[in-house]
Amino acid sequence: MEPEVGKSPFPVAKSPVQPRTVGTLDFFDALKEVTAGRRITRLDWGDNNSYGYLKDSLLLIHLRGKDHQWMISEGDLIGEDWVII
């Protein structure tokens, strides 16, 4: 029996691997942009009001009008539809 995995409160990709769209980034390139002071989001989230950013050396996600410490998921890592906003 497989262990039960809790659901993340963060937006989750609809499928494990998203095809890369022209002008999009993989997570590692997007994270480089975050460390340069930019905000990132995923096309799959369909919402520019949900984004990740760096503040006071913490990786945060702005979701539903509030900031949360960002717990990076497997979907985040394999997503290739990251964009800078």
Image (tube, rainbow, N blue to C red):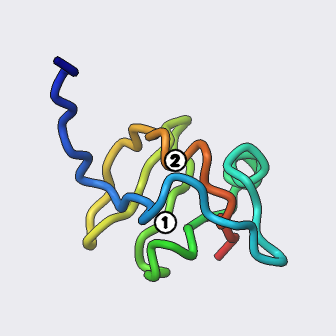
Residue 7 is drawn in which quadrant? Answer: top left
Tell me: 24 left or right of 10: right
Tell me: 36 left or right of 83: right
Q: Amino acid at mark 2?
A: Lys
Residue at 51% x, 52% y is: 16
Assess disc 2: are there few (<14), some (14-19) or many (≥20) residues with their C-alpha within 10 Å of its C-alpha: few
Q: Can you give x and y, in whole percent of width and height, for residue 84 in the image? A: 69, 70
Q: Amino acid at mark 1?
A: Tyr
Label 1 SS: strand
The residue that label 2 is drawn on is 55
Quarter that holds the C terminus: bottom right
Give the vertical position of 69 relative to 4 (above or below).
below
The residue that label 1 is drawn on is 51
Label 2 SS: strand
Q: Can you give x and y, in whole percent of width and height, for residue 76 in the image? A: 53, 48
Residue at 27% x, 72% y is: 65
Residue at 52% x, 47% y is: 55
Tell me: 3 left or right of 84: left
Quarter that holds the N terminus: top left
Residue sitting nearer the eye, 79 or 38: 79
Q: Can you give x and y, in whole percent of width and height, for residue 28 in the image? A: 73, 43
